[in-house]
Image: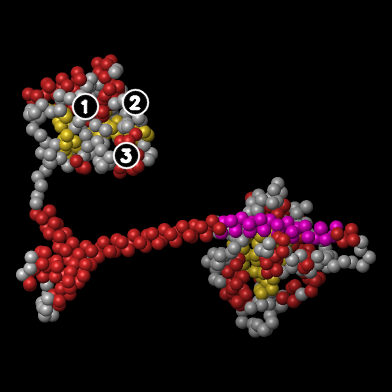
Amino acid sequence: MPFAICRIQKIKDWGSLNGNESHTARIKDIPNANPNVDNLRLIGTPDDPSLATLVKNKIGEQKIRSNAVLAVELLLSASPDFFRPDDPSKASYYLPERLEDFQQATRCWLNQTFGDRIVRAELHLDESTPHIHAYLVPLDEYGKLNCRGLFGGYEKLYQLQDSYAAAMASVGLERGIKGSRAKHTKINKYYAAVNQSFETLNLESFFPQTQVGESSESYRQRTIELLRPQLEMINHQLADRTRLLRQKTQLEQTAINSEKLRQQLERELHSRLQQTKQLQDLPPVQVAYELGLNHSHQPHVDALDLVMQINQYTFDQASAWLYERFGTEGMLQAVIHHARTQALNIAQSICFQPFVPPQQNAAHWSEVEHYLTLKRCLPQKLVQALYKHRLVYADSFGNGVFTARNLALEVTGAYLHPTNINENVFNLYSTSRRSQGWFHISMGGTKDSPTKTAIVVSSPIEALSLATLNVPHNHRTLYLTIDSEYAKIPVEFLQNVPTVVIAMPTTAARSVKKVLPQAIHLKPNTTWNEQLKNQNFYHQKPVEEMER
Protein backbone atom coordinates (compact mmCIF):
# COMPACT_ATOMS: atom_id res chain seq x y z
CA MET A 1 0.00 0.00 0.00
CA PRO A 2 1.40 3.47 -0.82
CA PHE A 3 2.67 5.70 1.98
CA ALA A 4 1.88 9.26 3.03
CA ILE A 5 5.03 11.40 3.34
CA CYS A 6 5.40 14.38 5.68
CA ARG A 7 8.64 16.31 6.22
CA ILE A 8 9.26 19.60 8.04
CA GLN A 9 11.99 22.22 7.90
CA LYS A 10 12.41 25.03 10.45
CA ILE A 11 13.29 28.44 9.04
CA LYS A 12 15.07 30.78 11.47
CA ASP A 13 16.14 33.79 9.39
CA TRP A 14 14.67 35.99 6.66
CA GLY A 15 17.40 35.14 4.15
CA SER A 16 16.56 31.43 4.34
CA LEU A 17 12.87 32.26 4.00
CA ASN A 18 13.52 34.27 0.85
CA GLY A 19 15.64 31.41 -0.49
CA ASN A 20 12.83 28.94 0.16
CA GLU A 21 10.39 31.17 -1.68
CA SER A 22 12.76 31.42 -4.66
CA HIS A 23 12.70 27.63 -4.84
CA THR A 24 9.04 26.84 -4.24
CA ALA A 25 7.63 29.80 -6.21
CA ARG A 26 10.11 29.06 -9.04
CA ILE A 27 11.52 32.59 -8.95
CA LYS A 28 14.88 31.08 -9.88
CA ASP A 29 15.70 28.19 -12.23
CA ILE A 30 15.45 24.78 -10.55
CA PRO A 31 17.70 22.09 -12.12
CA ASN A 32 15.37 19.15 -11.44
CA ALA A 33 12.14 20.96 -12.45
CA ASN A 34 10.46 20.97 -15.87
CA PRO A 35 10.04 24.65 -16.91
CA ASN A 36 7.18 23.73 -19.27
CA VAL A 37 4.89 22.56 -16.43
CA ASP A 38 2.89 25.02 -14.30
CA ASN A 39 2.54 24.59 -10.54
CA LEU A 40 -0.57 25.49 -8.53
CA ARG A 41 -0.94 27.76 -5.50
CA LEU A 42 -3.41 25.98 -3.22
CA ILE A 43 -3.39 28.51 -0.37
CA GLY A 44 -2.86 32.16 -1.24
CA THR A 45 -3.08 33.87 -4.63
CA PRO A 46 -0.53 34.89 -7.27
CA ASP A 47 -1.15 38.52 -6.30
CA ASP A 48 -0.11 38.00 -2.68
CA PRO A 49 2.95 39.88 -1.37
CA SER A 50 6.23 38.05 -0.78
CA LEU A 51 6.41 35.10 1.59
CA ALA A 52 8.50 37.13 4.06
CA THR A 53 5.83 39.85 4.09
CA LEU A 54 3.08 37.28 4.76
CA VAL A 55 5.08 35.83 7.68
CA LYS A 56 5.84 39.29 9.13
CA ASN A 57 2.18 40.27 8.92
CA LYS A 58 1.17 37.07 10.70
CA ILE A 59 3.78 37.55 13.48
CA GLY A 60 2.65 41.11 14.00
CA GLU A 61 4.34 43.53 16.41
CA GLN A 62 5.58 40.95 18.95
CA LYS A 63 9.27 40.87 19.77
CA ILE A 64 11.13 38.12 17.92
CA ARG A 65 13.78 36.21 19.86
CA SER A 66 17.16 35.84 18.17
CA ASN A 67 16.78 32.03 18.08
CA ALA A 68 13.10 32.00 17.19
CA VAL A 69 11.74 29.89 14.33
CA LEU A 70 10.06 32.32 11.94
CA ALA A 71 8.28 29.72 9.82
CA VAL A 72 8.04 26.00 9.26
CA GLU A 73 8.03 24.47 5.78
CA LEU A 74 6.05 21.25 5.40
CA LEU A 75 6.71 18.91 2.47
CA LEU A 76 3.67 16.69 1.91
CA SER A 77 3.57 13.92 -0.67
CA ALA A 78 2.98 10.23 -1.30
CA SER A 79 5.02 7.37 -2.66
CA PRO A 80 5.01 7.25 -6.49
CA ASP A 81 2.88 4.08 -6.72
CA PHE A 82 -0.06 6.10 -5.35
CA PHE A 83 0.02 8.64 -8.21
CA ARG A 84 0.86 6.11 -10.96
CA PRO A 85 -0.02 2.58 -9.76
CA ASP A 86 0.34 1.02 -13.22
CA ASP A 87 3.87 2.35 -13.78
CA PRO A 88 5.54 3.84 -10.67
CA SER A 89 8.82 4.34 -12.55
CA LYS A 90 7.24 6.73 -15.08
CA ALA A 91 8.49 10.05 -13.71
CA SER A 92 6.43 13.25 -14.10
CA TYR A 93 3.22 11.28 -14.70
CA TYR A 94 0.17 10.98 -12.47
CA LEU A 95 -3.48 9.98 -12.60
CA PRO A 96 -5.51 13.24 -12.46
CA GLU A 97 -8.18 11.79 -10.20
CA ARG A 98 -5.57 10.63 -7.66
CA LEU A 99 -3.84 13.99 -7.74
CA GLU A 100 -7.19 15.69 -7.09
CA ASP A 101 -7.90 13.37 -4.11
CA PHE A 102 -4.40 13.98 -2.71
CA GLN A 103 -4.45 17.77 -2.92
CA GLN A 104 -8.02 18.08 -1.61
CA ALA A 105 -7.32 15.85 1.40
CA THR A 106 -4.02 17.63 2.13
CA ARG A 107 -5.53 21.09 1.89
CA CYS A 108 -8.39 20.04 4.20
CA TRP A 109 -5.87 18.67 6.74
CA LEU A 110 -3.81 21.88 6.65
CA ASN A 111 -6.88 24.03 7.25
CA GLN A 112 -8.26 21.86 10.04
CA THR A 113 -4.91 21.37 11.78
CA PHE A 114 -3.29 24.80 11.46
CA GLY A 115 -6.02 27.16 10.23
CA ASP A 116 -4.87 30.60 9.15
CA ARG A 117 -1.35 29.96 10.42
CA ILE A 118 -0.72 28.47 6.95
CA VAL A 119 0.17 31.52 4.86
CA ARG A 120 0.97 29.74 1.59
CA ALA A 121 0.84 26.30 -0.01
CA GLU A 122 2.22 25.35 -3.45
CA LEU A 123 1.42 22.14 -5.36
CA HIS A 124 4.48 21.19 -7.43
CA LEU A 125 3.81 19.20 -10.59
CA ASP A 126 7.07 20.00 -12.40
CA GLU A 127 9.18 17.32 -10.66
CA SER A 128 8.98 13.54 -10.80
CA THR A 129 6.24 13.09 -8.19
CA PRO A 130 3.56 15.65 -7.12
CA HIS A 131 4.11 17.20 -3.70
CA ILE A 132 3.01 20.21 -1.67
CA HIS A 133 5.15 22.85 0.05
CA ALA A 134 3.17 24.56 2.84
CA TYR A 135 4.47 27.43 5.01
CA LEU A 136 3.31 27.66 8.61
CA VAL A 137 3.90 30.49 11.07
CA PRO A 138 4.32 28.57 14.41
CA LEU A 139 2.05 30.61 16.67
CA ASP A 140 0.76 29.00 19.85
CA GLU A 141 -2.72 29.47 21.34
CA TYR A 142 -1.59 32.84 22.74
CA GLY A 143 -0.43 34.11 19.34
CA LYS A 144 3.26 33.90 20.23
CA LEU A 145 6.01 32.38 18.13
CA ASN A 146 6.50 28.97 19.74
CA CYS A 147 7.78 26.30 17.37
CA ARG A 148 8.86 24.09 20.26
CA GLY A 149 5.30 24.05 21.55
CA LEU A 150 4.09 22.72 18.18
CA PHE A 151 6.91 20.47 16.99
CA GLY A 152 9.35 20.08 19.89
CA GLY A 153 10.49 16.51 20.60
CA TYR A 154 9.87 13.14 18.93
CA GLU A 155 6.44 12.75 20.46
CA LYS A 156 5.04 15.84 18.73
CA LEU A 157 6.63 14.76 15.44
CA TYR A 158 4.99 11.33 15.85
CA GLN A 159 1.68 13.09 16.42
CA LEU A 160 2.20 15.16 13.27
CA GLN A 161 2.84 11.98 11.23
CA ASP A 162 -0.16 10.25 12.82
CA SER A 163 -2.40 13.21 12.09
CA TYR A 164 -1.39 13.48 8.42
CA ALA A 165 -1.56 9.71 7.86
CA ALA A 166 -5.06 9.58 9.39
CA ALA A 167 -6.23 12.39 7.09
CA MET A 168 -4.78 10.65 4.03
CA ALA A 169 -6.14 7.19 4.85
CA SER A 170 -9.41 8.10 3.12
CA VAL A 171 -7.61 8.39 -0.22
CA GLY A 172 -5.70 5.11 0.18
CA LEU A 173 -2.45 6.16 1.90
CA GLU A 174 -0.98 4.64 5.05
CA ARG A 175 1.59 5.76 7.61
CA GLY A 176 5.20 4.58 7.66
CA ILE A 177 6.37 2.29 10.46
CA LYS A 178 5.36 3.87 13.75
CA GLY A 179 7.88 3.78 16.56
CA SER A 180 10.91 3.53 14.31
CA ARG A 181 13.93 5.22 15.83
CA ALA A 182 15.19 6.31 12.40
CA LYS A 183 16.44 9.86 12.40
CA HIS A 184 14.00 12.30 10.77
CA THR A 185 15.18 13.63 7.41
CA LYS A 186 14.82 17.38 7.01
CA ILE A 187 13.59 18.82 3.74
CA ASN A 188 16.92 20.35 2.69
CA LYS A 189 18.77 17.04 3.26
CA TYR A 190 16.00 15.19 1.46
CA TYR A 191 16.39 17.41 -1.63
CA ALA A 192 20.18 17.15 -1.44
CA ALA A 193 19.88 13.36 -1.43
CA VAL A 194 17.60 13.04 -4.46
CA ASN A 195 19.84 15.35 -6.48
CA GLN A 196 22.90 13.13 -5.94
CA SER A 197 23.92 10.28 -8.19
CA PHE A 198 22.20 7.09 -6.96
CA GLU A 199 25.52 5.27 -6.53
CA THR A 200 26.87 7.88 -4.09
CA LEU A 201 23.64 8.38 -2.13
CA ASN A 202 24.30 8.55 1.60
CA LEU A 203 21.71 6.36 3.34
CA GLU A 204 23.13 6.45 6.89
CA SER A 205 20.55 8.93 8.12
CA PHE A 206 17.74 6.65 6.90
CA PHE A 207 18.77 3.42 8.69
CA PRO A 208 16.93 2.62 11.96
CA GLN A 209 18.84 1.75 15.09
CA THR A 210 18.82 -1.88 16.20
CA GLN A 211 16.56 -2.86 19.06
CA VAL A 212 17.64 -4.96 22.04
CA GLY A 213 17.29 -8.65 21.26
CA GLU A 214 16.26 -8.02 17.66
CA SER A 215 17.32 -10.68 15.17
CA SER A 216 19.19 -9.80 11.99
CA GLU A 217 16.27 -10.97 9.82
CA SER A 218 13.81 -8.85 11.79
CA TYR A 219 16.10 -5.82 11.46
CA ARG A 220 16.47 -6.44 7.71
CA GLN A 221 12.73 -6.64 7.17
CA ARG A 222 12.10 -3.55 9.30
CA THR A 223 14.76 -1.61 7.39
CA ILE A 224 13.29 -2.61 4.02
CA GLU A 225 9.79 -1.57 5.07
CA LEU A 226 11.07 1.73 6.46
CA LEU A 227 13.21 2.66 3.44
CA ARG A 228 10.89 1.47 0.69
CA PRO A 229 8.74 4.61 0.28
CA GLN A 230 11.70 6.99 0.55
CA LEU A 231 13.85 5.03 -1.91
CA GLU A 232 11.03 4.74 -4.42
CA MET A 233 10.57 8.50 -4.50
CA ILE A 234 14.33 9.10 -4.64
CA ASN A 235 14.79 6.65 -7.52
CA HIS A 236 11.98 8.23 -9.52
CA GLN A 237 13.29 11.72 -8.91
CA LEU A 238 16.74 10.57 -9.99
CA ALA A 239 15.17 9.27 -13.21
CA ASP A 240 13.57 12.66 -13.66
CA ARG A 241 16.93 14.31 -13.01
CA THR A 242 18.51 12.21 -15.77
CA ARG A 243 15.80 13.35 -18.17
CA LEU A 244 16.33 16.97 -17.21
CA LEU A 245 20.09 16.64 -17.69
CA ARG A 246 19.42 15.45 -21.24
CA GLN A 247 17.17 18.46 -21.75
CA LYS A 248 19.91 20.66 -20.34
CA THR A 249 22.36 19.28 -22.93
CA GLN A 250 19.85 19.98 -25.69
CA LEU A 251 19.29 23.51 -24.39
CA GLU A 252 23.05 24.09 -24.29
CA GLN A 253 23.26 23.04 -27.96
CA THR A 254 20.34 25.35 -28.74
CA ALA A 255 22.19 28.16 -26.98
CA ILE A 256 25.29 27.47 -29.10
CA ASN A 257 23.20 27.56 -32.27
CA SER A 258 21.48 30.75 -31.09
CA GLU A 259 24.85 32.37 -30.46
CA LYS A 260 25.97 31.46 -33.98
CA LEU A 261 22.76 32.96 -35.34
CA ARG A 262 23.27 36.08 -33.22
CA GLN A 263 26.79 36.52 -34.59
CA GLN A 264 25.52 36.05 -38.14
CA LEU A 265 22.77 38.64 -37.60
CA GLU A 266 25.33 40.96 -36.05
CA ARG A 267 27.51 40.67 -39.14
CA GLU A 268 24.51 41.28 -41.40
CA LEU A 269 23.49 44.29 -39.31
CA HIS A 270 27.02 45.69 -39.50
CA SER A 271 26.97 45.20 -43.27
CA ARG A 272 23.61 46.96 -43.56
CA LEU A 273 24.82 49.82 -41.38
CA GLN A 274 27.83 50.19 -43.66
CA GLN A 275 25.54 50.22 -46.68
CA THR A 276 23.29 52.79 -45.01
CA LYS A 277 26.31 54.92 -44.16
CA GLN A 278 27.38 54.82 -47.79
CA LEU A 279 23.98 56.14 -48.84
CA GLN A 280 24.46 59.15 -46.55
CA ASP A 281 26.39 62.13 -47.87
CA LEU A 282 29.78 63.08 -46.55
CA PRO A 283 28.85 66.00 -44.23
CA PRO A 284 29.11 69.15 -46.41
CA VAL A 285 30.14 71.23 -43.36
CA GLN A 286 33.28 69.09 -43.03
CA VAL A 287 34.00 69.58 -46.73
CA ALA A 288 33.39 73.34 -46.37
CA TYR A 289 35.89 73.44 -43.51
CA GLU A 290 38.49 71.61 -45.62
CA LEU A 291 37.83 74.07 -48.47
CA GLY A 292 38.63 76.97 -46.14
CA LEU A 293 35.11 78.40 -46.02
CA ASN A 294 34.20 80.38 -42.89
CA HIS A 295 31.73 79.14 -40.31
CA SER A 296 28.94 81.38 -41.53
CA HIS A 297 28.89 79.58 -44.85
CA GLN A 298 26.15 76.95 -44.71
CA PRO A 299 26.36 74.73 -47.83
CA HIS A 300 23.04 73.97 -49.57
CA VAL A 301 24.49 71.46 -52.04
CA ASP A 302 25.95 68.01 -51.59
CA ALA A 303 29.64 67.47 -50.83
CA LEU A 304 30.69 66.64 -54.41
CA ASP A 305 28.84 69.62 -55.91
CA LEU A 306 30.39 71.90 -53.28
CA VAL A 307 33.93 70.86 -54.27
CA MET A 308 33.12 71.25 -57.97
CA GLN A 309 31.65 74.75 -57.43
CA ILE A 310 34.29 76.19 -55.09
CA ASN A 311 37.38 74.74 -56.80
CA GLN A 312 35.93 74.81 -60.33
CA TYR A 313 36.71 71.14 -60.67
CA THR A 314 35.36 68.49 -62.99
CA PHE A 315 33.66 65.42 -61.54
CA ASP A 316 36.90 63.43 -61.84
CA GLN A 317 38.97 66.16 -60.16
CA ALA A 318 36.44 66.60 -57.35
CA SER A 319 36.43 62.82 -56.70
CA ALA A 320 40.24 62.80 -56.52
CA TRP A 321 40.24 65.80 -54.15
CA LEU A 322 37.74 64.07 -51.82
CA TYR A 323 39.84 60.90 -51.90
CA GLU A 324 42.96 62.84 -50.95
CA ARG A 325 41.22 64.67 -48.06
CA PHE A 326 38.79 62.03 -46.72
CA GLY A 327 40.10 58.69 -47.96
CA THR A 328 38.28 55.94 -49.85
CA GLU A 329 35.29 55.73 -47.50
CA GLY A 330 34.60 59.47 -47.46
CA MET A 331 35.03 59.80 -51.23
CA LEU A 332 32.65 56.88 -51.90
CA GLN A 333 30.05 58.35 -49.53
CA ALA A 334 30.05 61.64 -51.43
CA VAL A 335 30.08 60.07 -54.91
CA ILE A 336 27.35 57.48 -54.16
CA HIS A 337 25.10 60.11 -52.57
CA HIS A 338 25.67 62.48 -55.50
CA ALA A 339 24.89 59.79 -58.09
CA ARG A 340 21.85 58.61 -56.16
CA THR A 341 20.47 62.15 -55.86
CA GLN A 342 21.06 62.87 -59.55
CA ALA A 343 19.41 59.59 -60.59
CA LEU A 344 16.32 60.29 -58.45
CA ASN A 345 16.00 63.80 -59.88
CA ILE A 346 16.27 62.48 -63.43
CA ALA A 347 13.78 59.66 -62.82
CA GLN A 348 11.25 62.01 -61.24
CA SER A 349 11.58 64.53 -64.05
CA ILE A 350 10.67 62.04 -66.77
CA CYS A 351 7.01 61.16 -67.00
CA PHE A 352 6.26 57.85 -68.74
CA GLN A 353 3.02 57.55 -70.60
CA PRO A 354 0.55 54.79 -69.70
CA PHE A 355 0.94 51.59 -71.64
CA VAL A 356 -0.59 51.74 -75.10
CA PRO A 357 -1.30 48.30 -76.62
CA PRO A 358 -0.56 47.51 -80.29
CA GLN A 359 -3.05 48.83 -82.79
CA GLN A 360 -5.73 46.30 -83.68
CA ASN A 361 -6.00 45.33 -87.36
CA ALA A 362 -9.30 43.58 -88.10
CA ALA A 363 -8.15 42.63 -91.60
CA HIS A 364 -5.64 40.17 -90.16
CA TRP A 365 -7.96 38.68 -87.56
CA SER A 366 -9.14 35.85 -89.83
CA GLU A 367 -5.51 34.68 -90.13
CA VAL A 368 -5.05 34.62 -86.36
CA GLU A 369 -8.42 32.97 -85.79
CA HIS A 370 -7.65 30.33 -88.43
CA TYR A 371 -4.28 29.63 -86.76
CA LEU A 372 -5.76 29.28 -83.28
CA THR A 373 -8.72 27.08 -84.25
CA LEU A 374 -7.20 24.86 -86.95
CA LYS A 375 -3.51 24.61 -86.06
CA ARG A 376 -3.89 24.93 -82.27
CA CYS A 377 -7.30 23.17 -82.07
CA LEU A 378 -8.77 25.78 -79.73
CA PRO A 379 -12.60 25.89 -79.76
CA GLN A 380 -13.94 28.62 -82.05
CA LYS A 381 -16.41 29.74 -79.37
CA LEU A 382 -13.56 30.33 -76.91
CA VAL A 383 -11.46 32.19 -79.50
CA GLN A 384 -14.40 34.43 -80.41
CA ALA A 385 -15.00 35.18 -76.72
CA LEU A 386 -11.33 36.16 -76.31
CA TYR A 387 -11.58 38.42 -79.37
CA LYS A 388 -14.81 39.99 -78.08
CA HIS A 389 -13.09 41.00 -74.83
CA ARG A 390 -9.95 42.06 -76.74
CA LEU A 391 -7.81 39.55 -74.90
CA VAL A 392 -6.62 38.17 -78.24
CA TYR A 393 -6.59 40.07 -81.54
CA ALA A 394 -4.39 40.71 -84.62
CA ASP A 395 -1.93 43.54 -85.20
CA SER A 396 -0.98 45.08 -88.55
CA PHE A 397 1.77 42.44 -89.05
CA GLY A 398 -0.60 39.52 -88.64
CA ASN A 399 0.72 38.59 -85.18
CA GLY A 400 -1.63 37.28 -82.54
CA VAL A 401 -1.72 39.86 -79.71
CA PHE A 402 -2.32 38.36 -76.24
CA THR A 403 -3.21 41.05 -73.70
CA ALA A 404 -1.59 41.07 -70.25
CA ARG A 405 -3.61 42.45 -67.33
CA ASN A 406 -3.25 42.84 -63.60
CA LEU A 407 -5.79 41.18 -61.33
CA ALA A 408 -7.85 44.37 -61.31
CA LEU A 409 -8.24 43.76 -65.10
CA GLU A 410 -6.20 46.83 -66.08
CA VAL A 411 -4.17 46.30 -69.27
CA THR A 412 -0.44 46.38 -68.47
CA GLY A 413 1.21 44.85 -71.53
CA ALA A 414 0.95 42.52 -74.50
CA TYR A 415 2.65 39.47 -75.99
CA LEU A 416 3.03 39.02 -79.76
CA HIS A 417 2.79 35.51 -81.20
CA PRO A 418 3.68 34.89 -84.85
CA THR A 419 1.11 32.72 -86.63
CA ASN A 420 3.58 31.25 -89.12
CA ILE A 421 5.20 28.94 -86.54
CA ASN A 422 3.90 26.15 -84.36
CA GLU A 423 6.05 26.85 -81.28
CA ASN A 424 5.17 28.65 -78.02
CA VAL A 425 7.14 31.77 -78.93
CA PHE A 426 5.75 34.95 -77.39
CA ASN A 427 7.61 38.24 -77.78
CA LEU A 428 7.01 41.01 -75.25
CA TYR A 429 5.60 44.14 -76.85
CA SER A 430 7.72 47.25 -76.23
CA THR A 431 6.67 49.55 -73.34
CA SER A 432 4.84 46.65 -71.62
CA ARG A 433 5.00 46.64 -67.82
CA ARG A 434 6.02 43.01 -67.68
CA SER A 435 6.06 42.61 -63.89
CA GLN A 436 2.73 44.36 -63.38
CA GLY A 437 0.43 41.93 -65.18
CA TRP A 438 -0.08 38.52 -66.75
CA PHE A 439 -2.11 36.90 -69.47
CA HIS A 440 -4.98 35.28 -67.59
CA ILE A 441 -8.57 34.17 -68.11
CA SER A 442 -11.28 32.95 -65.75
CA MET A 443 -13.64 30.11 -66.61
CA GLY A 444 -16.81 28.93 -64.90
CA GLY A 445 -19.06 30.70 -62.45
CA THR A 446 -19.84 34.39 -62.86
CA LYS A 447 -17.77 37.54 -62.78
CA ASP A 448 -18.52 38.04 -59.10
CA SER A 449 -17.89 34.40 -58.08
CA PRO A 450 -14.84 33.85 -55.84
CA THR A 451 -11.91 32.05 -57.44
CA LYS A 452 -11.74 28.53 -55.99
CA THR A 453 -8.99 27.13 -58.22
CA ALA A 454 -5.96 28.82 -59.79
CA ILE A 455 -3.94 27.00 -62.43
CA VAL A 456 -0.50 28.37 -63.29
CA VAL A 457 0.81 27.62 -66.82
CA SER A 458 3.79 28.71 -68.89
CA SER A 459 2.24 30.45 -71.93
CA PRO A 460 -1.09 31.84 -73.21
CA ILE A 461 -1.52 28.92 -75.65
CA GLU A 462 -0.96 26.45 -72.79
CA ALA A 463 -3.47 28.32 -70.63
CA LEU A 464 -6.17 28.20 -73.31
CA SER A 465 -5.42 24.55 -74.16
CA LEU A 466 -5.69 23.38 -70.54
CA ALA A 467 -8.85 25.44 -70.03
CA THR A 468 -10.37 23.60 -72.99
CA LEU A 469 -9.26 20.20 -71.70
CA ASN A 470 -10.84 20.92 -68.31
CA VAL A 471 -14.33 21.71 -69.65
CA PRO A 472 -16.78 21.83 -67.91
CA HIS A 473 -15.77 24.08 -65.00
CA ASN A 474 -17.94 23.57 -61.93
CA HIS A 475 -16.62 26.65 -60.17
CA ARG A 476 -14.64 29.81 -60.87
CA THR A 477 -11.18 28.79 -62.17
CA LEU A 478 -8.32 31.16 -62.99
CA TYR A 479 -5.69 30.29 -65.62
CA LEU A 480 -2.59 32.42 -65.10
CA THR A 481 0.53 32.57 -67.25
CA ILE A 482 3.95 32.71 -65.57
CA ASP A 483 6.32 32.85 -68.53
CA SER A 484 9.69 32.92 -66.75
CA GLU A 485 11.43 31.92 -63.51
CA TYR A 486 12.05 35.66 -63.00
CA ALA A 487 8.38 36.61 -63.44
CA LYS A 488 6.56 38.25 -60.56
CA ILE A 489 4.02 35.91 -58.95
CA PRO A 490 0.83 37.29 -57.30
CA VAL A 491 1.58 35.40 -54.09
CA GLU A 492 -0.76 37.36 -51.81
CA PHE A 493 -3.73 36.62 -54.07
CA LEU A 494 -2.88 32.96 -54.70
CA GLN A 495 -2.36 32.24 -50.99
CA ASN A 496 -6.06 32.96 -50.47
CA VAL A 497 -7.21 30.63 -53.27
CA PRO A 498 -8.28 27.23 -51.85
CA THR A 499 -6.60 25.16 -54.59
CA VAL A 500 -3.51 26.19 -56.56
CA VAL A 501 -2.19 23.91 -59.33
CA ILE A 502 1.17 24.38 -61.05
CA ALA A 503 0.58 22.85 -64.52
CA MET A 504 4.12 23.32 -65.82
CA PRO A 505 7.21 21.15 -66.43
CA THR A 506 9.31 20.51 -63.31
CA THR A 507 12.10 22.97 -64.12
CA ALA A 508 9.69 25.84 -64.77
CA ALA A 509 7.57 24.92 -61.73
CA ARG A 510 10.38 25.24 -59.19
CA SER A 511 10.30 29.02 -58.86
CA VAL A 512 6.52 28.95 -58.32
CA LYS A 513 6.74 26.07 -55.84
CA LYS A 514 9.26 28.01 -53.74
CA VAL A 515 6.80 30.79 -52.96
CA LEU A 516 3.66 28.59 -53.03
CA PRO A 517 4.75 25.37 -51.28
CA GLN A 518 1.12 24.39 -50.71
CA ALA A 519 0.46 24.23 -54.48
CA ILE A 520 -0.17 20.93 -56.30
CA HIS A 521 2.24 20.14 -59.13
CA LEU A 522 0.52 18.72 -62.23
CA LYS A 523 3.29 17.73 -64.61
CA PRO A 524 2.20 17.37 -68.27
CA ASN A 525 3.48 14.38 -70.28
CA THR A 526 3.71 16.63 -73.34
CA THR A 527 2.50 20.20 -73.81
CA TRP A 528 -1.14 20.82 -72.99
CA ASN A 529 -1.68 21.96 -76.57
CA GLU A 530 -0.30 18.67 -77.91
CA GLN A 531 -2.72 16.80 -75.65
CA LEU A 532 -5.55 18.96 -76.93
CA LYS A 533 -4.61 18.29 -80.54
CA ASN A 534 -4.52 14.56 -79.80
CA GLN A 535 -8.11 14.76 -78.54
CA ASN A 536 -9.79 16.35 -81.52
CA PHE A 537 -13.26 15.72 -80.18
CA TYR A 538 -12.65 18.35 -77.51
CA HIS A 539 -12.33 21.25 -79.91
CA GLN A 540 -15.74 20.39 -81.37
CA LYS A 541 -17.30 20.46 -77.93
CA PRO A 542 -18.93 23.78 -76.97
CA VAL A 543 -17.17 25.83 -74.33
CA GLU A 544 -19.12 27.84 -71.73
CA GLU A 545 -19.18 31.61 -72.09
CA MET A 546 -15.96 33.09 -70.68
CA GLU A 547 -16.25 35.87 -68.11
CA ARG A 548 -13.66 38.62 -68.04
Q: Does the magenta stretch include residue 365?
A: no
Residue 74 lies left or right of residue 501; in this view the side is: right
Q: Earlier in the sequence, mark 2 or mark 3?
A: 3
Q: Does the magenta stretch include residue 234?
A: yes
Q: Which of marks 3 and 1 is in front?
A: 1
Q: How far apart are labels 3 and 1 at the CA level?
A: 23 Å
- Mark 3 neighbour class, 10 Å CA radius: few under 14, some 14 to 19, many 20 or more: many
Residue 7: give x, y in percent of width and height.
72, 66
**Mark 3 secondary-structure assignment:** helix
Q: What residue lies at 37% left-to-right and 60% top-to-bottom? A: 265
Mark 2: amino acid: Asn
Position above or below: 190 against 384? below
- Mark 2 neighbour class, 10 Å CA radius: few under 14, some 14 to 19, many 20 or more: few
Mark 3: amino acid: Val
**Mark 2 secondary-structure assignment:** loop
Residue 541: give x, y in percent of width and height.
26, 17
Q: Which of 428 and 107 is in front in this view?
A: 428
- Choose top left, top right, bottom left or bottom right for residue 486: top left
Q: Is residue 106 visible?
A: no
Instruction: Please identify the residue farthest to the right as the structure is shown.
Output: 213
Q: What residue lies at 67% left-to-right and 83% top-to-bottom? A: 65
Mark 1: amino acid: Glu
Q: What residue lies at 28% left-to-right and 32% top-to-bottom? A: 457
- What's drawn in magenta, residue-wise? 221-248
Which residue, given by chain and number where applicable, does mark 2 sit on?
A: 525
Which residue, given by chain and number where applicable, does mark 3 sit on?
A: 512
Q: Which of marks 3 and 1 is nearer the N terminus?
A: 1
Which residue, given by chain and number where applicable, does mark 1 sit on?
A: 423
**Mark 1 secondary-structure assignment:** loop
Q: Which of marks 2 and 3 is in front?
A: 2
Magenta-colored segment: predominant secondary structure: helix
Q: What residue lies at 64% left-to-right and 51% top-to-bottom? A: 93
